[in-house]
Image: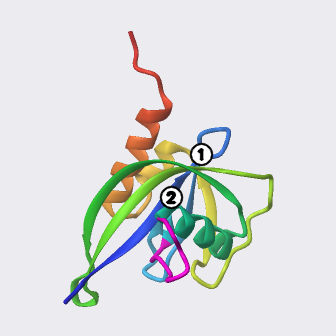
Amino acid sequence: MSLGVSVKAVLQDDAGRVLLGRNPRDEWELLGGRPDPEDSTPQDTLRRELLEEAGIAIDVGPILDSWIYDLGDLGRVCIVTYCAAPANGARLQVSDEHSDLRWFTADEALAARMPQGYKDSIRAAEALASPPAG
């Protein structure tokens, strides 16, 4: 079985909240998806996917993490996460890929039902946004 790739965004608003979507497995997840042939870069994939999934334009920041997600009989996927921020004040539009979209505080996101790898990426984004104490 081949290993697919999915590019995901830890999309944070000005208040530091993270946008998550509820998927068909009734889990919350970071938005994003698999690269299409017309995507030149992973950043292009994220910009296209967030427009499709949430109707929102984004600015893509640095890469955060990568990990292998084992979906059992559905296969395995290499998840690559990036920091991102909304590029405009557009209202979110739920697509057919998610039953709900919601902004979560970091604590709410870390308590939500989702794969640990997504939580690790959210923590990494939080650490990147917070200057070290000292």
> In the rendered image, which quarter is residue 133 located in?
top left
Against 44, is 3 above or below? below
Q: Main secondary structure of the magenta part?
A: loop
Residue 37 lies in the magenta stretch: yes
The answer to whether residue 28 of the structure is visible from this angle is yes
Q: Is residue 123 left or right of residue 92?
A: left
Which span of residues is magenta-colored? 33-41
Residue type indicated by callout 2: Ala
Going 79% across and 62% down the picture, which residue do you hit? Answer: 91
Q: Secondary structure at mark 1?
A: loop
Q: Position of residue 28 (x, y in %)?
A: 48, 66
> In the rendered image, which quarter is residue 46 located in?
bottom right
Q: Secondary structure at mark 2?
A: strand
68 or 99: which is nearer to us? 68
Measured in 3D between alpha carbons, the distance from the residue under mark 2 to the one under mark 1, in whole angstroms, is: 13 Å
Q: Position of residue 59 (x, y in %)?
A: 63, 51
58 or 123: which is nearer to us? 58
* Neighbourhood count class around disc 2 (C-alpha, 10 Å): few under 14, some 14–19, many 20 upward: many
* Neighbourhood count class around disc 1 (C-alpha, 10 Å): few under 14, some 14–19, many 20 upward: some
- Identify the image quadrant of the C terminus: top left
Q: Is residue 48 left or right of residue 120?
A: right
Residue 11 lies in the magenta stretch: no
Q: Which residue is mark 2?
A: 9
- Marks 2, 1: nearer the viewer: 2
Residue type indicated by callout 1: Arg
Residue 17, numbered label: 1
